[in-house]
Amino acid sequence: MKKFLFLFCCLISQPLFAEQFQAPVTDTRWQVVESPLECSLTQNIPGYGNAGFYRRNGSSLKMVFSTLSQPAQDGEVSFQIAPAPWQNSDDVDILTSLPTDAGQTRFQIEGSVALEALAQLQEGRFPMIEYRSQPFSRDIQVMLSTIRLNDSLPAFQQCLQNLHPDSFEEVNKLTVYFPLGKATLDAASKEALNRLAGYVKLDDSIRRIRISSHTDNYGRSRVNEPLSDARAHAVKQYLLAEHKIPAELIQVESYVDHKPAASNKTVEGRARNRRAEITLIR
């Protein structure tokens, strides 16, 4: 009896094996989504959700695991690299660990750590996460499969190379400046508008382009009011004529000298006030 109790205590003192989720060897499918603004390489993981790599233009690479069935408990998630079968090893390498909130369903790393995970995947190793799930009340492991990776990886890499150079954050607020008493666009202004228009043509989420025009406070209102209007019109016409931006996207506002960006008491301040501000709105 004492021997039985000793063995029983030893057994219950051992940690339970983690529940594992992975795409089946016979049905692993990688999906590549390609656009000038975003690239993704993902696979469905039955019983769990999906996982893979994402990158949006202007941002770093991300590795993301998403689930609806296995939300996390309060604790932490460990991002790991499991060995390839040919390595004959059970040791895993820890990439990083991050805190989790109760109910969390998305787990991600980005930048150099995500790049390392992708490089390890290409070497035949298995990026995975481990955390304590609410439904199981114990640790689970979720692993990316390497099966058929080489069928989809070239398209993903090509997409990364072709990402548009400008992100929304880089072009959504633009200011162009005008010479004293004029409403003409110089070369620098046209180049900035070219970048903005190039992005607008790619991003279907842009609902409006707002153009706000301004003058300094020198000169009479009967001169400055039409001058402010002309500056907004110059920007609008450039977008319409040179880039065929739909007119219904463009909203024009003329503030004359009522919203200065700087003091009108200095030459430099007045130069900053002779402007048009272009804002992209989603």
Image (tube, rainbow, N blue to C red):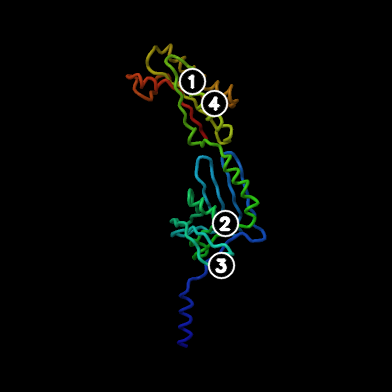
Question: What is the spatial separation of the Cα atoms under label 4 and label 1, in whole angstroms?
Answer: 21 Å
Q: Secondary structure at mark 3?
A: loop
Q: Secondary structure at mark 1?
A: loop
Query: Residue at coordinates 56% horizontally, 39% vertically from top-left?
Result: 163
| Vertical comparison of 8 with 205: above or below | below
Query: Residue at coordinates 57% horizontally, 41% vertically from top-left?
Result: 161
Mark 2, residue position: 123
Please state which amino acid type lies under the numbered disc 2: Glu
Labels 2, 4: front one? 2
N-term mark: 2 or 4: 2
N-term mark: 3 or 1: 3
Mark 4, residue position: 250
Question: What is the spatial separation of the Cα atoms under label 3 and label 2, in whole angstroms?
Answer: 15 Å
Counting other residues with Cα less than 10 Å from the Cα at mark 4, is it few (<14), some (14-19), or many (20 or more)?
Answer: some
N-term mark: 4 or 1: 1
Q: Which mark is residue 27?
A: none
Please state which amino acid type lies under the numbered disc 4: Ile
Mark 1, residue position: 186
Q: Nearer the viewer, residue 6 or 196?
A: 196
N-term mark: 3 or 4: 3
| Vertical comparison of 223 with 143: above or below | above
**Contact check, label 3 and label 2, Cβ < 8 Å:** no
Give how far across and how far down residue 240 sits, in percent.
58, 23
